[in-house]
Amino acid sequence: MTTAAAPDMPMPEDTLDTAPAAAAADVPGRKRPKPGERRVQILQALATMLEQPGAERITTAALAARLEVSEAALYRHFASKAQMFEGLIEFIEQTVFGLISQLDERESDSLVRCRKLVALLLQFGEKNPGMTRVMVGDALVFENERLQQRMNLFFDKIEATLRQNLREAASLGGAATPTVDAQADASVITAFCVGRLQRFARSGFKRSPNESLEHSLALLLPGGRG
């Protein structure tokens, strides 16, 4: 099997710009933010704090201090810290699944879709280190249990998408048990993605999740294994 080049997919606004949050806090006598702006600034600040390697649990007091506002000001925009994390998770879901939808529309080859899905997921994690800590659960250890459940569901959906594509490829290839094969392959590939993101987070964002990706995918995807 000939491995494809790294995908040249369009990557829209797939990073949460963390600069405005810090800039807004540094400007003395700044104007009152427009409706919705403060909410975005809070999420930007939270994402920035999560990007610090080895960062401990983030408190609302620390978050408020970074933004130079009171904790009460935070709660005017979010009912709880769990809601703030849900805002980050919504960004992850909308961005990644939006890119996957574009991929489904543009790419007819099911195995190429699988390869590019893995690449875009890992590229998103590398561009958004703070989000990676949310995706793999490191930032959610002491938070509300429903947050981890939501991230589990995110990866369940990734696995389901891979399974659908792999079943299509197996059927076209004349496999005797396409559904069983697709289920096993999708599980392994999803575990690979989670493992790469975990290693990226726990290395202090030094080990790229995309390291030797084409070689790895050649081993993982059907048709590339010897």
Image (cartoon, helix red, strand yellow):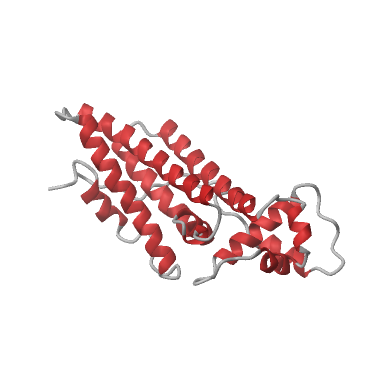
Is residue 127 something that shows in the picture?
Answer: no
Q: Quadrant of residue 56?
A: bottom right
Q: Is residue 152 left or right of residue 216?
A: right
Q: How many marks?
A: 0
Q: Is residue 38 left or right of residue 135?
A: right
Q: Is residue 109 left or right of residue 23?
A: left
Residue 82 drawn above or below residue 30? above
Placement of the N terminus among the 4 image quadrants:
top left
> Is 24 in front, or is 79?
79
> Is 213 in front, or is 77?
77
Image location (x, y in percent) of residue 60: 67, 63
> Is 213 in front, or is 8?
213
Image location (x, y in percent) of residue 42: 69, 57
Is residue 122 something that shows in the picture?
Answer: yes
Image location (x, y in percent) of residue 224: 19, 46
Residue 115 drawn above or below residue 80? above
Q: Quadrant of residue 184?
A: top left
Q: Residue at x 59, y 53 (%)?
A: 85
Q: Residue at x 41, y 67 (%)?
A: 202
Image location (x, y in percent) of residue 100: 45, 39
Q: Is residue 154 left or right of residue 34?
A: left
Q: Residue at x 21, y 36 (%)?
A: 181
